[in-house]
Image (cartoon, rainbow, N blue to C red):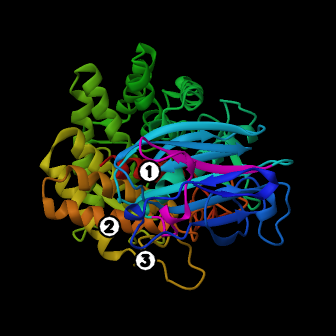
Amino acid sequence: MLCIDNPPVGRALCEALEPRRMLAVNPGTGLVAAYFPNSDFTGTSTVRVDRKIYFDPASLPPGLEPTTYSIRWTGKIKPAYSETYTFTTQADDGIRLWIDHKLIIDDWNIHPPVSQSEVIPLKASRKVDIEVEYFNHKGGAEAQLWWESASQIKSVVPTSRLYPEAPDTTDKIDHAFAFAQSQMARTLTAINNNPDLYVINTNATGAWETTDGTSWTAGFLAGELWQLYQRNGRRALRLNATAWTRSLADQTSLPSDMGFRIGVPFVPMYSASNDTADRAALVSAANAKMEQFDATVGMFRSPGGTSLPSNPSGDFAVLLDHAMDMPLLYRATTLTGDGKYAQGATSHLLKLAQYYVRSGGSTAQWGYFNSATGAFVGHTAKQGYSADSTWSRGQAWAMHAYASSYEATADPALLAIARNVADYWIGHVPADGVPYWDFAAPVTATTYRDSSAAAVAASALVQLSQIDPDLTRQVAFRAAAEKVITTLLSPAYFAEGRFNGGVLLHGAAYVPRKNPIADSALIYGDYYFLEALNRYTNS
């Protein structure tokens, strides 16, 4: 046992000396430590390697005020024994500990020095990822990490067992969920914990703009809460998800966007509750959608358009985005046993693909049919660059809608369409996996990217990698998804360290319009990003 006689702030520090045979051939040197000048890991950080986690304010980097700050340690830990280890944190104030991608200690509160302990089995000489996050609110501060096992005497985790290696994708996903949860807490506070308010996009200051329950985006706040709850099962997340879901129960009679507004929050709500009222909300929304079905056209009418400007005989508008309502209809058939919902959905999707999915897999967003004959009349521009271009989020909607519909039906025709639109995406998206707002938009230094389209596509690609029966395609789809996820987790798009309420930066909601929303955090981008991460880690 080696003891330091005069450790910081007068505490005795002892570190067990390992038997020579247990010392690593290449002993560790510590963990990467990033120090932030606030309690929420925002702004510019100072990065160094800390030999161990035994922190006190005297060791702060130069220039960092010893008041309010946060620290993130990352790297690898390599145990000496194949045993169950007890990890203990001693902290003033909050601390979180991940070992091998498992959040084993989560004490994110302001308090005097407190010890927390949890156990986890580890294997000798096998490096696993470790991440520790700590914040100090003000006043006294300390953060320590200890371990022990049957053969390992209790001690501060020694330098020789810590390695400052870069975090892998799973580490980054662990952290992304922790960040998303902290952002969600701020969001709910910002809207006064009012479940009748919903956020849609951030403004120039980085704050969320709000909307009411009639907005097509209203379901995504609850949806994001359900994604967070799926990740860590915290009761507070479930309660908030329930509140923001059930506040939409009176919005089930609207004619469109039911997949977004009702399906996104109520599908997990019903799975969690098995409550007949939640089931009724899903069926009611499906019934409202069915009222828009026209047997002559064989499709669902989309509101918002009267006739094709260049040819008034086109009087039945169809928006590609509303393919995202179809999985709700398949769900309704499962819930009720009534095949009319699934039949309507499949009819719509097959005819949509016939006229909106081009031979090479690109898509059109907005067009018209003739209501008397059911014949297709023509396309026109809506959110894309032109009527003949490929709006990137529309392409992503198609990928997601057809993949989800194939999963619901096992219909090979739907799989073929899902493959076609996904192949176009993979073959035309920029090398980093994040598209410009339209695939046909002229590319300059100021052309907007759309992180929300990337998030939707990533989720669809992960889903396809899990459900496509062709192994070669599974691998290709997963590789494409990983590319997108890696980029979205990078500082170029991940909102951490910025004064922004969202999780992802650089979402392009509306570019070609008088008052564009072309570079913001978007609540649906955040939702589909977390959906993609959950799907990826659960595969």
Q: Which mark is residue 440?
A: 3
What residue is rendered at 35% in x and 53% in y? 536
Image depth: mark 2 or mark 1 in front: 1
Callouts 1 and 3 close, C-beta under 8 Å = no
Give the residue at x 40% y 31%: 267
Residue 203 falls left or right of residue 512: right
The residue at which mark 1 appears reads as 101
As drawn, the residue found furthest toward the top would be: 276
> Dot 2 corresponds to which residue?
480
Q: Position of residue 316 (x, y in %)?
A: 38, 47
Secondary structure at badge 3 equals loop
**Between discs 2 and 1, the one toward the N terminus:** 1
Amino acid type shown at disc 1: His
Residue 59, image x and y in percent?
Answer: 77, 64
Q: Amino acid at mark 2?
A: Ala
Magenta stretch holds residue 147:
yes
| 87 left or right of 520 in image | left
Magenta range is 141-167
- How many angstroms separate mark 1 from mark 3 (CA)? 40 Å
First in residue order: circle 2 vs circle 3: 3
